[in-house]
Image (cartoon, rainbow, N blue to C red):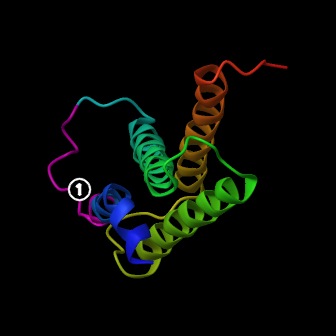
């Protein structure tokens, strides 16, 4: 257990950063010239990076680039729990932020993109034949 935490320190720190950033008040950002979906893009990026860090920690822990389907399922469950927890916190605790299903969707899209990237790069890294 301690070894897992030691290998996943980047993911843990990033998850704490995401939790803080998603629950901070957005005072003074009304005047910024951002496009309409900027918030969703930020959510996507946060969870893309989190998923990459989770894969990186798993690689460091097992000292191998191999992956199992169970690892991917665990990563999806962990990130979905964090994304859902953030939205629940925004809904019930940090009421100055708005909880939206689209934020959760953007989070899961970032996770999916990172998983696809890892699987794709894993195959090309070891010269496995693509189907």
Q: Nearer the viewer, residue 128 or 72?
A: 128
Which quarter of the rendered picture does the C terminus lie within?
top right
Mark 1, secondary structure of its residue:
loop
Circle 1 residue: 26
- In the orientation shown, which residue stands out farthest toward the front? 63
Residue 127 location (% of width, % of height):
67, 18
Residue 20 location (% of width, % of height):
27, 65
Q: Nearer the viewer, residue 39 or 130?
A: 130
Which residue is pictured at 48% across the width and 64% down the height? 99
Q: Nearer the viewer, residue 125 or 102?
A: 125
Placement of 87 over or under 35, stated as above or below: below
Left or right, 37 with respect to 104, comes to left
Left or right, 3 with respect to 84, comes to left
Left or right, 1 with respect to 20, comes to right
Q: State the extent of the magenta-drawn residues as a range.
A: 19-32
Which quarter of the rendered picture does the N terminus lie within?
bottom left
Which residue is pictured at 39% across the width and 42% down the height? 42
Residue 88 location (% of width, % of height):
50, 75
- In the orientation shown, which residue stands out farthest toward the right? 131
Residue 96 counted in the magenta span? no
- In the orientation shown, which residue stands out farthest toward the left? 28
Q: Nearer the viewer, residue 3 or 77?
A: 3
Q: What crowding class fits label 1: few (fewer than 14 Cα within 10 Å), some (14-19), or many (20 or more)?
A: few
- Prevalent SS, magenta region: loop
Placement of 34 over or under 91, stated as above or below: above
Residue 31 location (% of width, % of height):
18, 38
């Amino acid at each position: 257990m301690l070894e897992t935490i030691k290998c996943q320190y980047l993911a843990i720190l990033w998850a704490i950063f995401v939790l803080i950033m998603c629950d901070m008040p957005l005072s003074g950002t009304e005047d910024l010239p951002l496009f309409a979906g900027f918030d969703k893009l930020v959510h996507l990026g946060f969870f893309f990076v989190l998923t990459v860090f989770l894969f990186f920690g798993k690689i460091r822990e097992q000292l191998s680039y191999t992956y199992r389907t169970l690892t991917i399922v665990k990563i999806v469950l962990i990130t979905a729990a964090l994304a859902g927890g953030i939205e629940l916190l925004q809904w019930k605790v940090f009421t100055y932020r708005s909880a939206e299903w689209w934020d959760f969707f953007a989070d899961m899209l970032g996770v999916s993109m990172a998983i696809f990237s890892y699987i794709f790069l894993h195959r090309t890294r070891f010269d496995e034949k693509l189907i």
